[in-house]
Every structure is written in structure tokens, then in C-alpha cells.
Amino acid sequence: MYEQVSHSLLNEILQELKVESGNGRMRHFYTRLGANFYSIHSLFSLLYGERPDFKAQLRRLVETLAARYVGRSAALRKSDLAREKDYNWFLSQKWVGMALYCDRFAGDLQGLRARLPYLQELGINMLHIMPLLDCPPGRSDGGYAVRDFFRIDARYGSTDEISELAANLRKRDMLLVLDVVVNHTSDEHQWAQRARQGEQQYLDYYYVFDGREMPDLYEETMPEIFPLTAPGNFTWDAEMGKWVMTVFNNYQWDLNYRNPAVLIEMIDIILFWANQGADILRLDAVAFLWKKIGTACQNEREAHLLLQIMKDCCQVVAPGVLFIAEAIVAPSEVTKYFGEDAINAKECEIAYNATLMALLWDAVATRNAVLLNRGINSLPSKLERATWLNYVRCHDDIGLGFDDNDVRLAGYDTVKHRRFLIEYFTGKFPGSSARGLPFGENPRTGDARISGSLASLVGLEVALENQDEAGVDAAIQTILLLHSVILSFGGIPLLYYGDAIGMLNSIEYLADPDRRDDNRWVHRSRLDWNKAERRHQPGTVEHRIFNGLKGLIARRKEATAFADFDNRHLLSVENPNLMVFYRACQQGSRNRVLVVANFSVTAQSQHVGMLRLHGFFRQDGVRDICTGECAVLSGDMLHIPPLTCCWYTE
Ligand code: OTU
């Protein structure tokens, strides 16, 4: 019944819009719209059904989709069709990503294009360029305070160069990932400017209030994201004479998705970038999309409904394009961004695995895998056609977002353990050689996160300063160990640009008044290409890291068991320093890979009895994929060198 209503409404809208259904060019559009409209209509009704302009808004949405479909190039449409057939294409082990800043890595887009061979040398075939859109110079939050969603910042080049780059990448069989900042705009965006001038249409794009009554109600339950630099969640705008919701920095105005016009604008923006040739879009801060008094204003059901509409609309216009959910939220919440009660992702196909990231850092500090194993065990399973983005470091800080219950079960006091981690990574804990900085310390709650480059956090900076060779070795081993885990865990590994050559912290940002209060810039330094050149000189730190990673990446791509078909089996072993899991090939049990990671700084042994139970070590033992040698056994004990992760095959 409802489906019929949906269907006739769609026909009515199409007639009003006078888009000819007989038009051959629009054939796939109609098929896909027909297939997705029931869902789009239901979701749109749930969110906006009470509004008198409901039908007009829905019509506007369909019109937007039709216009963007018309604008999609023949090449991209062809790729859509191919990916619709090979719909699990992104679960393959062949993909390995890197996130980088265009300017910090290569100056501008031309420079970036010239550096693609460097990425290919390492084996990278998925390129996430950090946000490129036009932002006000000083107040940009590293690109996340967008002033114009349709124009890239002139410093990088022209907007056309993006589609050229995308086409170039396609020829190299590389994927392009771009950001869409869906939660907020810069206060200099024209919507914000027009709101300031009192235009009601644009005041309705944001959460704007005359007095403190509503902001105070919201504040009762909203946490602070940047408590030191941007306390509270509202900013007084003197020009407007009103309070505006600014969850992140005070110049980032939160969009109000209670207004369907905002959703339609954002879908239009998403499809615009899909049409520029992006293969994957990273949707920033998706947990924050819906605000409700009396809640933390994160992970609300409506935020999920919004993402579902965005996905459905993308299925209609650009079905080959995937979404990454950037939702740095509790483990129990994060898998919901794939969509619940489904097989295929109905929100985002890919989600940042912040849980694994934080757990890996816990293992580095504690030198054991106790919490890591617990945390992985309680990571809710994901949908079949969905995958993780596994990373060690990214442009943001490290949040210690473990499940408190897991922390307790691991035998720690939740408060004391987090304090230990902060002390460890800021180098205050006795014996720690980490050089991180506390980020977002909240004096009220005692919370803090951590900034710092991978190399500095694992002690490379300190070891180099002290000319401590063993320390250098341990730091390099740790870098390779962590990457070895994200390359074998299941999902798409995402490297962070400086990490492949061991870039240290850079304090350059302190000289820039616009950046000095945000210490995340300590790990967003300019890539030192002289240093990168040393990757070709055997014996250098750069060579050891780069070459090590390059080998791991190549081996990953060969191991079909590493494709992500929910084929990871975590094994419980007696040795608390080890994480042990195996990956089984989708077809049959042959070709399995056993992953054994030792987080201790000393060699560890593990009885192979249990591994035998799982069919490993049947006869002569197993072969190490990376070295080609057999596993080191003495009697029935398997030996794993310190800070090492081995990939064994039968
Ligand atoms: C994201 O961050 C971006 O990655 C940050 O670089 C931006 O500053 C922020 O959004 C605002 O656009 O929203 O869902 O430091 O982990 O703010 C999580 C905390 C986010 C970040 C968090 C994150």
C-alpha cells in the first residue's frame, strides 16, 4: 500500500519536473530511482513528513538527483555499471591507502601528480587527499571549515584539476578519496553570511538562538570537543546578535538538518564531488549530524536516517561511489554507521576503525595485548558488504575511546589506566621514550587525547637524539609491527603520509598564530623530500621503514586470505604479549594466514598445541610469508622475536 503511494508520488513528481522517462540517456537513472524511491520517500517522511512543504522539498530532491545524473560523465557511468556488477570490489586485499595533505606533501595538485610514482613505489593505490575546498586562510581547521563547497582553494590549483587528477589516477588503477564536510560550514560561507544579514532562509540553515535559554539546555548534555580552544558548543555572533551552535571551533557553524533544504544542498554537494571523479567520499563528523536536547547530540537515530538518504541518493546517481564514515565513537556505536539489520551497507560502506587504532596504542604502551585482544573480541561484527578503514595514525589526535568494561576486564582501573596512557605518550611515565603532546585536555573531566607523529610516539625521536641504536631498532620495529597488523587485520589499511619515512614531530606550527593553539599540527608537517630520498640508501632509518612497509604491502596484496570477507578468527592464547588470529580464504580452507604479533620488547614463545587444533602446524610447521623461512620452533614452542608481527602460511 505504502509502496503504491510512493510509486504514484514519484510519477507525479516526474511529470511535474517534465523529465522524459522515455529518454534513453536517463534509462539507468529511472531504474535506480525506481528501486530506491520507496526508501528515500519513507526516510524523508520520517524526518520531514510533518512539514507543509514536504512534497515540494521531495520534488526538489528528485530534481537535484536528475540534474546531477545528467552531469555525470560517460566514463564515470561506465565505472558505475562495472562496480554494480562487481559489487564487492572494495573488499579485495589489493587496496592500500594513504592520507596526505596536498600542500604539505607536494605543494599543489600539479606537484601531487608528479609525486604519484612515489606512492606507487610504496604500493599505495588509494589516495585520500585531505580537504581541498576553499576555506578562510587562518580559520580553516586544516580544511574542515569550508567557505565554498564547489571550489577548491586557489593554493592547490583549479577545480578542473581534480577531475584531471581523478582521470589520471583511474589510469593507474588508483582510487581517489575526497572529503565532504557534512556537519558544519565556515562562518564565512555565504549561507552564514546571509544568516548574519538576517535572511530567514539562511538563519534556518543553522542552530541560531536569540538568548541563552536553548543553548543552556543543549549544554546540559553536550560534551565539549575542543575544550581548551573552543569551550562550549555555542558562540555569540555580535553582528547577528545571536547565539549559534558551534560544536567544533567557534568559526564552524553546525548545519541544521531539521531543515530539509540543508540535506538537499549537501546531497547536491556530495554528488558534485562524485561527478568530479572521486571514487570514495569521506563524510566528516557524521556522528554529529542530528542534535537533540537532553542527549549528547551524537549517534542520534536521525543522523543514521540522514546517512541512509544520502546513500540511497548516491545509489541513484553514482552507485560506484562509496562513503567512509568518520565516526570516532564508542565501539558499540561505530558499526551502526554501516547500517543496522542489513547485509549490505545502507549508510557508509567503510568506517574508520578508531577502536583498533586506540587498542594498538594501548598495546604499545603496555607492551602486551591484553586489552587489545579483549577490545577486538568485543568489536561488534560488521555487515558483509562493508569494511573497516584500519589506521595507526591520521591527521587527528589519538582518543582513548576504549570500552570501559573491557578496560576493567583487562584488570585496569579505567581512570588510572587512561592517566597512565597519557603520561606514557607524553613521555612523563618513567622509561617512556614517547614524545606526544596532550590534546584537548579537559580540566573538568580530566580527559585528554594525544597528538604526535607515529615516529615520535614510538620513541624514534628520543632514540635518535640519544644515539641509542637499540632504541632506534625498537622504534622501527614498532612502526612495522603496527602496520603489519593494519595490513592483515581485515579492511583497507590507510597509512599517514609522513609515517612511511619516519617523519618526527615538527614544532614549525608554533610560529604560526593561527595554528599554535592546535597541537595536532605537530604531526601535520611538510614532507621532507630530502629525507624521503634516503629511502633508497640501505641502512638509513628511512630505507628500513620504507622498504619494510613496501614489502609488507606487496605481500598483503598477494595474500587472498586478507580480503575482507569476515574471515578473521581471533585465537585466545596463554601468552598475554601476543595477539594471534588467522585469516581464512573465502573459498575453502587452503591458503590461510596465521598472524602472530608480539608487543613485548623481548622474544616470546607460545605453545603450538592450540594452533595445531586449528589445523596449523600439521606437519612441518608453517612458512613466514615475509621472510620465506619456516616458523622458528623449539620443541612445541613457537618463537616470536620482540616487537614483531609474523604472517605464516600453511
Ligand atoms: C573531524 O574530527 C576531523 O577529522 C577533524 O580534523 C576536524 O577538526 C573535525 O572533524 C571538525 O571538522 O568529528 O567524528 O580531534 O577526532 O573532531 C569525529 C577530535 C570528529 C576528532 C574529531 C573528529
Image: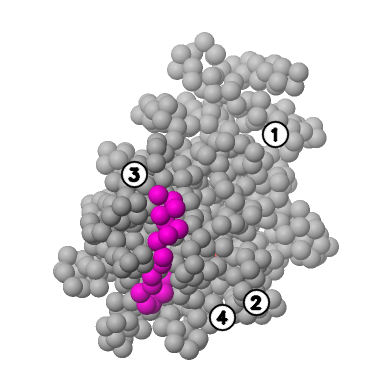
- Say which residue label 3 marks: 591
Q: Is residue 30 above or below residue 91?
A: above
Q: Earlier in the sequence, mark 4 or mark 2?
A: 2
Separation (CA) of disc 4 from disc 1 = 47 Å
Q: Residue at x 56, y 80 (%)?
A: 420
Mark linked to residue 420: 4
Dot 1 amino acid type: Phe
Q: CA distance from mark 4 to mark 2?
A: 10 Å
Residue 212: % across, % down: 80, 65
- Front position in the image: 372 or 43: 372
The mark nearer the N terminus, 1 or 3, is 1
Q: Amino acid at mark 3?
A: Asn
Q: Nearer the viewer, mark 2 or mark 1?
A: 2
Question: Is disc 4 placed on a helix, strand or loop?
Answer: helix
Up/down of 446 relative to 592, above or below: below
The quadrant in which residue 401 appears is bottom right
